[in-house]
Amino acid sequence: MTATVDAPTAELGKARLRKEDAKLLTGQTNWTDNIKLTGMLHLAFLRSPYAHAKITRVDVSGALGQPGVIAAFSGADFAAEQGSLPCAWPVTPDIVIPPHPPMAVDEVRYVGEAVAVVVARDRYAAADALASIDVDYEPLPPVLDIRTALDPGSPKVHEAGNKSYEWVFANGDVDAAFSDAPVVLERTYRQQRLIPCAMEPRAVVAQWVGDEVTLWSATQIPHVLRFALSAFFGIPEQNVRVIAPDVGGGFGSKLQVTAEEVLAVLIGRKIGKPVKWAETRTEGNLTVHHGRDQWQQIKIAAEADGRIRGLSVDLLADMGAYLMLVTPGVPLLGAFMFPAIYKMDAYSFKCTGVFSTKMPTDAYRGAGRPEATFAIERIMDELAAELGIEPLELRERNWIKHEEFPYTTICGLTYDSGNYEAATAKARELFDYDGLRAEQRLRNERGDKVRLGIGISTFTEMCGLAPSRVLGSLSYGAGGWEHAAIRMLPTGKVEVVTGSSAHGQGHETAWSQIVADQLGVPFEDIRVLHGDTQVSPKGMDTYGSRSLAVGGLALVSACDKVVAKAKIIAAAMLEASADDLEFSAGRFSVRGDPEASKTIQEVALATFAAHALPEGVEPSLDSDATYDPDNFSFPHGTHLCATEVDTETGFVHIRSYVAVDDVGVVVNPLIVEGQVHGGIAQGIAQALYEEGVYDEAGNLVTTTLADYLVPSAADLPSYRTERTTTPASNRLGVKGVGEAGTIASTPAVVNAIVDALRPLGVQDVTMPCTPERVWRAIQAAHGQPAQGQPAQGSEQSGGMA
Amino acid sequence: MIPAKFDYVRPSSVGDAVSALAGGGEDAKVIAGGQSLLPLLRLRLAYPELLVDIGGLDELCGVTDDGDHLLIGARTTHYQLVHDPLITEHCGLLAQAAGTVADPAVRHRGTLGGSIAHADPAGDLPAVVLALDATMIATGPAGGREIPAGEFFVDYLTTALAPGEILTGIRVPKLGADWGYRYEKFHRTAQAWAIVGVAALVRRSDGHVAEARVGLTNMGSVPIRAAAVETAAAGAQASPEALREAAAGADEGTQPPADLHGAPDYRRHLARVLTGRALEAAAGV
Ligand SMILES: Cc1cc2nc3c(=O)[nH]c(=O)nc-3n(C[C@H](O)[C@H](O)[C@H](O)COP(=O)(O)OP(=O)(O)OC[C@H]3O[C@@H](n4cnc5c(N)ncnc54)[C@H](O)[C@@H]3O)c2cc1C
């Protein structure tokens, strides 16, 4: 351990404005779609209008005569070389992974699947020529409801059937926990399909020079993509360079090896010219991988005092038409999170992955954990109502107490740190929990048309993906380490290379802060490089709230190495023994003789000159480090939401929202705040607004942002956010924060809606809780009590009345 | 979102615009703020061959006092409607409704004329001009003519404007101080279109409703007047109970659409609730 860890830290915790922002705000961004190469041609894809059909003929010749068109291809033209898009997570030995050609050859299985492509001089000519391609389809029956897709008579998405896999986990005696339990509740919750809407649509440019290809892509995973292009598409790895220039958001949707990336590379090679493709928003809604889409059956057994005995979860997860990069693994990331912060004797989990004729699903902010957190936090509220126990009290009776950490959960995860009492106490106070409860009672008694509801989410999540050995035990195809490198430049400035490929997170700022502290150099003297496999050759990229908790620690370790080497050189410069040197705030000084010192910048210059390096020391002050975490990171927090529900229209207004998050030690509070705000917004979006809807023929209905409603600032409350800090057990004490808000907020909002309506007999509202759904839920529960008559009971007595 | 090819002209007088439009025949279209037309072009739901941009016609901009009427140029933007003092004073309903359209970016570009000529039943301003008993003023190859709002909206996205005609402005009767108004817009997000909207105008006298006018947004293929409500409200007591009772017939004769945001029965219910609320607010009770 370096001395700097104990030294007073200058940068850690500072609310630095982001280094990235000046460029972003003044339009100097280098998006993939801004790239213009000499002779570059443009691609437009013709996409299937059918959810399921045989392709009997594709004739692209009509497009060839169109103005500006250089070439046109159908799937058959790539049959020999296009292989299959990879799935890196075969979760069980007998999982069915159907072939997934980047361009359909003889069958299409979702609306939007690519069937042909035009290559033209500009994107307008390319789009115009699509109309001149002839495709004959023989429609097949679509498979749209995974609840019936496993029935014997169901049409099949793939010849092998509609089941991809079944994955199970159990610990403890589940039967004993449920038999003769005083209370058993069973609920089915729907995790609707979501469509990620990153600000920057996907875009790709591929350029071949000789046998080398450079692929620019709006991707989260340049390193994984490079590996995939060579491992699965036969391009020697040393000949592939992947660049993720500025990338405008991903939320998991750019954690993918996409058909368009592979096809751009193949087409570029065929044509011998650089090619570009940039999706339209409609194309994006159709073909960016979707998120969530599960049916969750959850059963809880408890004692009369509310203590949980056991939990049992049975999931149906919609894979969509194919398995993409981590499609089947997403529900598994949730498997370990249903027990959440609660102690229990037994737990069983089963997930069945089912195919449908829809766009494949895959990771979307939180990936598996928001789904799990939603179900457990919803049913905890139901249990509280059933038992007549105050819902916060019920949670406290079950959660792991702060003095019990580290704690091994029923899932076998070891939570290293946490303090649920502290976060909850703070949230309660900020929210004025008792005051709002009193107002709620009053409004219920008056029979107000606008009811008040209070929603609770005491959540945790597992992030910092991931210990490689755990990934291996779950059959994932890669490791979970991260890489960092430091290059001290002769003038004492620093280049930092990170394998974690930022796409909006603010790595350049946060990494500079960490390095500034570790090396004792000014924040401004540090440049962070990432997102180009030639600059940053090693990495596992950015997802799963891993950058800081994994990549940040690789960075600390790289700094250690630089300091260790610099110390040897400084010792020679000071004619002292390295053992007698201490390093603090960028300066090596001889213990007991503070006058005798050298700054790390002086050492860097001396290393460059190399005139007087000690014997055997090479003239460079660089380092390389990889870090493989030995545990996940477990941020947690308490989110409280107050909603006002208009019982006449069903409209839900979020009146106040309090988030107290514990993300461990904070490097930059502004960045953390931004992640929490955006995260909460995305979770509220699932609760109230967003849903990817297919009609009964399998057409996507929500193809524009007029139909797929993404909330804006105008729709969201001013959050009140606070933090508690229980340091994680890594050297920086940091946990992940990228997904926490999204994971926490969805159940807080829905719990608040149900809490408002429970006196009217409402037990659940399906997400998104649109005004129409809320109104219908009230109607179904026989509407309001007669005017002026006090509502029966309070919000906690619904199940007991 | 890549439109098909089109030609583009930007005339400098209404006369030139009319001739350009006439020259382009069926395949020519006016473009004003582009906030409804451009999305259609980009989704390739419309393929005009010629766009006649009236963006240079400053004479179609702004509001003038015309005695007992206001004359509002077709190119007046939503933003201008919200901020114009004449509008606020004499037909505040229009300013209030324009303030609910989309977001600031759209309100700065989108125009009153475009909203009305586009005749989207989900648009907020058609129902408002209907309730205001406004008159549309058009110019075509054969000269000018006036069309009352009640005859202007013919069908979904279809108006009484003949091909080649340009809407130059609308004439709105000034409302006296005894009129109250309210535009109740119900939508899921601030930027979203109305699931249902209700434009209500109420003239009060002696604790009673002397006259009420109610326009409905998105309750059929055209904006409609809620005639049953207007009849029931006239003469009714200006009390919440009486106005809610009058609002019970708000969905009479409507044919609300079904879409992701609401089934017809829900829209009917909303029309009744929102009409009650709009009348109450307009009557100041
Ligand atoms: C994101 C978004 C959200 C929106 N939300 C709403 C909303 O909530 N409520 C709402 O009411 N509207 C909404 N709109 C539409 C907006 O109000 C448009 O501005 C308006 O409908 C059209 O005005 P425009 O000037 O942009 O017309 P354009 O788009 O230029 O034209 C629309 C149509 O009218 C014709 N036209 C335009 N001007 C004339 C004229 N003077 N004479 C003859 N024909 C003409 C055009 O040929 C075209 O057919 C939204 C638009 C967007 C992009």
Image (cartoon, coloured by chain):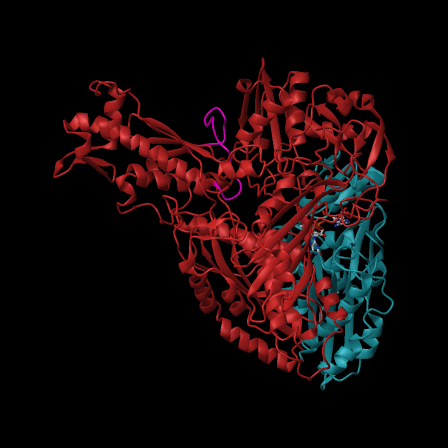
Vertical placement of A341 versus A162: above or below? Answer: below
**Which residue: 72% across, 76% down?**
A784
Q: Residue furthest top?
A: A210
Residue A548 placed where, x, y %? 44, 42
Horizontal side of residue A9 vs A98, given as left or right: left
* Viewer can see residue A361: yes
Q: Which chain is red?
A: A
Q: How many numbered circles are shown?
A: 0
- The residue nearer to you, when weighing A707 against B209, is A707
* Viewer can see residue A752: no
Q: Is residue A411 magenta?
A: no
- The residue nearer to you, when weighing A147 against A457, is A147
Horizontal side of residue A155 vs A100, given as left or right: right
Vertical placement of A371 versus A139: above or below? Answer: below
Q: Quadrant of the N terminus of chain B?
A: top right
Q: Is residue A532 magenta?
A: yes
- The residue nearer to you, when weighing A28 against B164, is A28
Q: Quadrant of the C terminus of chain B?
A: bottom right
Picture quadrant of residue A340? bottom right
What range of the chain is rendered magenta?
A529-546
Vertical placement of A715 versus A701: above or below? Answer: below
Picture quadrant of residue A124? top right
Q: Which chain is cyan?
A: B
Vertical placement of A686 versus B39: above or below? Answer: below
Horizontal side of residue A219 vs B27, given as left or right: left
Residue A637 placed where, x, y %? 48, 58
Identify the main secondary structure in magenta.
loop
